[in-house]
Image (spheres, rainbow, N blue to C red):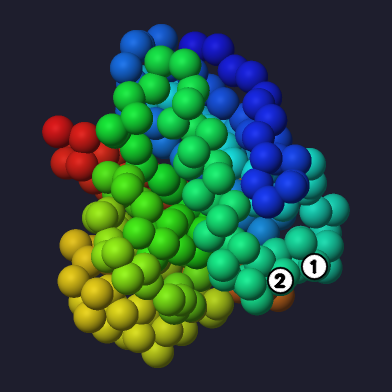
């Protein structure tokens, strides 16, 4: 395995991706969309984990210049403009996809995207944009709806959700499921009982935000993702 930082442009913005390369040629590509905090060590570590399993993994930069928030207030200030402008959000993840497909040793016909929290919204919007990827996985992602491309949807969807997530109430889950079904998307949602937001991140515990690490849900969700990969890359 080897790693490097790469630069790519989206709408004039300089983006800094982190790539962990598999030792295999013609390996599937997995894009990783970060939390509201930015492209930090958490997503870098997930890229490393995936490369060791035979995937080439690219942690994408949604904010530009590799910006990472210093606290919750700065995280929100970085995320909000993209949540408020979903067309720009879709452009940025599509730009990352284009850059990722050009990476050395990648099979451009085998591509998935995973995302955490804000990044879950990002990869779901990649699906909504009509991008030609095999599948996406949202870990405790935001499930707000957005426009779906007139060209249709080409991806399967796996949502891994904490049943107690205060940022994604049951009403939002229900509306999301209706949205996916109405668009004839091949989707599934796993809801982990007694589990809060950010359940995959040991450093994300913050009762005021409703975030809490859950080791069981973390392990189960990672296994579910790998099973999903086995299906979509078969």
Q: CA distance from mark 1 to mark 2?
A: 6 Å
The quadrant of the rendering that contains the C terminus is top left
Q: Residue at x 67, y 59 (%)?
A: 36
Check if mark 1's residue and mark 2's residue have beta carbons within 8 Å: yes
Q: Residue at x 56, y 56 (%)?
A: 91
Most foreground residue, 48 or 61: 61
Report whether residue 144 is seen. Answer: yes
Residue at mark 1 = 77
8 horizontally vs 14: left or right: left
Q: Residue at x 65, y 46 (%)?
A: 10
Most foreground residue, 15 or 51: 15
9 horizontally vs 136: left or right: right
Residue that sits furthest to the bottom in the current view: 171
| Secondary structure of residue under mark 1 | helix
Image location of residue 204, percent across then percent down: 65, 56
| Secondary structure of residue under mark 2 | helix
Report whether residue 214 is seen. Answer: no
Q: Is residue 55 above or below residue 114?
A: above
Q: Is residue 189 above or below residue 45?
A: below
Q: Residue at x 50, y 70 (%)?
A: 142
232 horizontally vs 76: left or right: left
Image location of residue 24, percent across then percent down: 35, 11
State the image quarter where residue 76 is shown: bottom right
Q: Residues within 10 Å of mark 1 (few under 14, many from 20)?
A: few
- Which circle marks residue 221 in the picture? none
Most foreground residue, 189 or 163: 189
Residue at mark 2 = 80
35 horizontally vs 194: left or right: right
């Amino acid at each position: 395995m080897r790693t490097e930082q790469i630069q790519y442009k989206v709408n004039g913005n300089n983006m800094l991706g982190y790539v962990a390369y598999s030792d295999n040629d013609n390996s599937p590509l997995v894009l990783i969309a970060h939390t509201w905090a930015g492209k930090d060590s958490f997503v870098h570590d997930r890229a490393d984990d995936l490369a060791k399993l035979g995937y080439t993994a690219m942690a994408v930069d949604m904010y530009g210049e590799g910006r990472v928030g210093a606290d919750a207030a700065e995280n929100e200030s970085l995320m909000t403009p993209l949540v408020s402008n979903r067309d720009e959000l879709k452009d940025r993840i599509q730009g990352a996809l284009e850059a990722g497909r050009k990476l050395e040793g990648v099979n451009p016909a085998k591509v998935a995207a995973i995302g955490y929290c804000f990044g879950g919204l990002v990869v779901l919007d990649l699906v909504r944009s009509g991008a030609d990827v095999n599948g996406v996985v949202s870990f405790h992602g935001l499930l707000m709806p957005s426009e779906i491309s007139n060209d249709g949807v080409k991806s399967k969807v796996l949502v891994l959700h904490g049943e107690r997530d205060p940022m994604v109430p049951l009403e939002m889950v229900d509306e999301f499921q209706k949205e996916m079904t109405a668009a004839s998307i091949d989707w599934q949602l796993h809801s982990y009982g007694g589990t809060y937001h950010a359940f995959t991140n040991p450093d994300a515990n913050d009762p005021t935000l409703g975030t809490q690490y859950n080791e069981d849900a973390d392990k189960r969700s990672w296994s579910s993702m790998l099973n999903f990969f086995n299906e979509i890359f078969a």
